[in-house]
Image (cartoon, grey):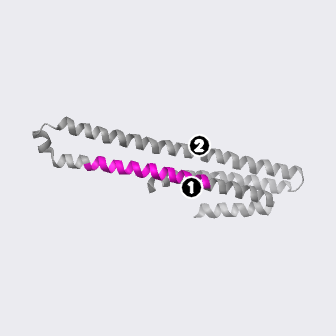
Amino acid sequence: MSSSLTLFFSILFYMYIHPHLGIIVSSIYIVKGFIIYIMIQRGFNASSNSTEENDHLHEHISDMLSNIMNIVSNDMIQYELDILDKHQDIYNNLFQKTIKISGQFKIVFNISYIILISCILAYSIYLHKHQKINTGQIISVLFVTSYLIHQLSHISGELRDFIYNIG
């Protein structure tokens, strides 16, 4: 909640400095929101599939332990171990997919950081060169932007865990 408020007030701050700067930041936030939505969908599906397969694996282990005497007496130990290996391989592949998506999310989020910061700073410098904002305002933009870097980094870490946990 506080991160959302920070982002909202940063947009207002950039709008106050110069409307075009606020529009640029708003546009980038909207694009970041769209990227987050797509990554949440991908992460949710992969995470829920991984969790489901993990549940199947544990159910099979529980069934095996319940029927251990029958398995041993019917000489089906290798058969049951093969089934466990199959479930474990499926689970490992799905879990690796969730880790891959998490890594992709971090890469995309970091690239969007760079774009956000570059756009803010480049346009601020442009506005300063054309005397649309003064030196004090550009210094304020630098401070707010550096604070946003911290906030967005915090959000990035939370979102990756959130995406995995909701699945």
Circle 2 residue: 107
Image x and y of residue 99, in percent: 47, 43
Picture residue at 27% right of the left edge, 40% below the top: 84
Image x and y of residue 27, in percent: 71, 56
- Is 20 placed above or below 83 here? below
User: Comparing marks 1 and 2, which lies closer to the viewer?
Assistant: 1
Front residue (pair 130, 40):
40
Circle 1 residue: 37
The answer to whether 96 appears left or right of 9 in the picture is left
Can residue 151 be seen in the rendering of this structure? no
Verify whether residue 159 appears in magenta: no
- Looking at the image, which residue sits at the far right? 131
Picture residue at 69% right of the left edge, 54% below the top: 28
Looking at the rendered structure, the kind of residue marked 2 is Ile
Looking at the rendered structure, the kind of residue marked 1 is Tyr
Image x and y of residue 124, in percent: 80, 52
